[in-house]
Amino acid sequence: MSKNESLRNNLIIIQARASSTRMPGKVLKPIWNGLCLLDLQIQALEPLNHKVVLATTINESDDLLEEWAKKNQLDFFRGEEENVLNRFVACAQYFGGQNIIRVCSDNPFIQFDQVHRYFDLLNGEVDYVSYSTSGGLPAIKTHWGLFVEGIRVEALQKCQKSIQGRESESYYQEHVTNFIYENASEFALLLEEAPASVVNRDDLRFTVDTTLDFQNMSELLRQLGGNTRIDLNKLIEMVSNQPEILERMAVGINDFKK
C-alpha cells in the first residue's frame, strides 16, 4: 500500500454532542479568548494533515454543532445518539476511513504526538492501540483526558456483530471501545504504558464534565495563553505546583469514581 493510499484510509473523528447531562453546550462555550473547546482542538489537529471529521448526533440540539462545522469548513457526520458505536462505524464508512483516531471533544489538552505512529500501527496488524495506566487500564477509562486511542474500523464492525443480542449490548454501543479491551484475546490489542510523568498520577483531570472542570481548564488556558500543545511534562509540572488546581481536579475525580 502506498503512503497516499494509507493516508486516505486514516480518519480522525472528534466525538461531540451538545446535550451533555452535567454541562449542556460545553463544547461550544467560549473557554479562552472567545474560543471554544472544539476551536482549540481543531487548531491543535491542523498541523497533522490528516482528515478530521466531527461526529455528532441527529438530536435537534446538535444543529448548533453542524452550524459550527460548516462555519469552520469541517466535515461532519450525524448519527445515532445513544449507539455511539454505530455512529463511529457509519461515519468511517461514509468518509471511506479504515483506521480511526478517536478524539473526545471535552479534552482541551489532548496530546496528539502519537497520531502518526498509531495510524502506522493500525495500517499494520494492530486492531486497537492506546496508552494505559501501569495496571493496564486504557487511558480512555481514566480521568486524565490527555490521550487519543486508535482503532481499526474492522474491529468496530466485529464488535457490532459480537454484541448483538447480549444483555450488555446497549452498554457496548454507548462505550465505543469497551468490548475490545474487555475481550482482548479476540483482538490485536496494544496497550503501551503512558509517559512516566502521568502513568501513576491518579490526581490529574484534564477533561471538562462540569462547570468546575470548565473553570479549572479555563484558568490553565489563561496561564498558558491558550497553548494546548504544551509539552506534556511541562504541563504536568505546572499543574503539580498549583495546589488550588489539583484541589479542583480532585472534586471532579471523586465524582468520576462514584
Image (cartoon, grey):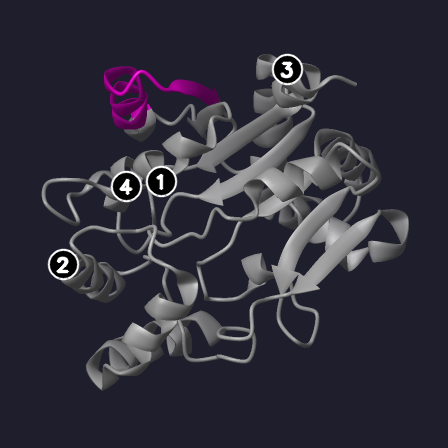
Give the extent of the magenta segment: 63-78
Q: Residues within 10 Å of mark 2 (few under 14, many from 20)?
A: some
Residue carrying label 2? 222
Give x and y (percent) for residue 171: 64, 50
User: Marks 4 and 2, Cα distance to the nearest angstrom?
Assistant: 13 Å
Give x and y (percent) for residue 81: 48, 33
Label 4 or label 3, whichever lies nearer to me, is 4
Residue carrying label 1? 44
Residue carrying label 3? 96
Give x and y (percent) for residue 147: 51, 54
> Three-letter amino acid code at disc 3?
Gly
For residue 57, above or below residue 234? above
| Residue 126 placement: quadrant | top right
Residue carrying label 4? 40
Choose the circle earlier in sequence order: 4 or 2.
Answer: 4
Along the viewing direction, whichever of 232 and 188 lies nearer the viewer: 232
Q: Residues within 10 Å of mark 3 (few under 14, many from 20)?
A: few
68 is within the stretch colored magenta: yes
> Three-letter amino acid code at disc 4?
Leu
168 is within the stretch colored magenta: no
